[in-house]
Amino acid sequence: MHIEFLRFSPDDVEPLVNFLTEEEWPFHAGTQDRETVKRRAVEGLYDNEETRTFWVLVNGERAGLVKLQDLADDTPMFDLRVRQAWRGRGIGTEAVAWLTDHLFTELPDIMRIEGTTRQDNHAMRAVFRKSGYAKESHYREAWPGPDGIRHDSIGYAILRRDWLSGTVTPPDWEDELVSPDE
């Protein structure tokens, strides 16, 4: 299986619209109607100074999409989508490894990279762990689902120093000082 990453271009608007609207994205929030996606793409929201989008090509087929966001900040975030037919084949892990290397290499001023997923997205949470990202946040009932059910939102990040050393530094979850009066 040959995986490569190709930067989104203005000629990719219609394939992007099809990609985002013809699939079910159960773990992604936001509007996915054709007109909204097309308008956002035409307005440059998928490729500008702060955002870059890449196709994940597997054997030449558009199997996924990586959207890198907040690139002017020292802590960019990303959105990753893999088509249903390609899930469970390690593409998410390859994509996160690629985007991590790409961001830390291309943007020397960034200190960390963040990503967020729903608590019940076990596949993505495994990808984060395999990719050296540490769990940093757990927001209860913070992610509204399309069915009206609110899910917990889980945040992960990797530090530049951990990426360089190949280690994972977990946050100090026991940092609250509890006084005897409490």
Image: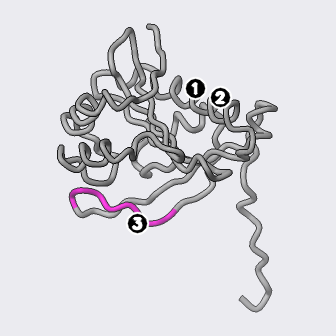
* Image location (x, y in percent) of residue 109: 74, 44
The label number, if any, that marks residue 101 in the structure image? 2
Give the class, few, some or many, for how many residues have Cα within 10 Å of label 2's Cα (few <14, many ≥20).
some
Q: Disc 1 marks which residue?
A: 98
Label 2 and label 3: CA atoms lie apart by: 32 Å
Q: Which residue is drawn at 31% across and 48% down?
A: 40
Q: Is residue 130 left or right of residue 154?
A: right
Q: Nearer the viewer, residue 144 or 119?
A: 144
Q: Nearer the viewer, residue 141 or 161?
A: 161
Q: Residue at x 63, y 47 (%)?
A: 157
Q: How far apart are marks 1 and 3 (CA)?
A: 31 Å
In primary-sequence order, the first of circles 2 and 3 is 2
Question: Which SS does the magenta portion mostly show?
Answer: strand
- At 38% from the left edge and 44% from the top edge, which residue is drawn? 44
Classed neighbour count for the residue bearing mark 1: other residues with Cα under 10 Å, few (<14), some (14–19), many (≥20)? some
The amino acid type of the residue labelled 1 equals Trp
Disc 3 residue type (three-letter): Glu
The residue lying furthest to the bottom in this view is 181
Q: Does the magenta stretch include residue 36?
A: no
Percent of width and height locating residue 28: 34, 48
Q: Do the residues labelled 2 and 1 touch (CB within 8 Å)?
A: yes
Q: What element carries label 1?
A: helix
Residues packed near mark 3 inside 10 Å, few (<14), some (14 to 19) or many (20 plus): some
Of the residues shown, which amino acid type is indicated by label 2? Asp
**Quarter occupied by residue 103:** top right
> Does dot 2 land on a helix, a strand or a loop?
helix
Which residue is pictured at 65% across the width and 29% down the height?
101
What's the magenta region?
139-147
Reading the image, the residue beneath label 3 is: 141
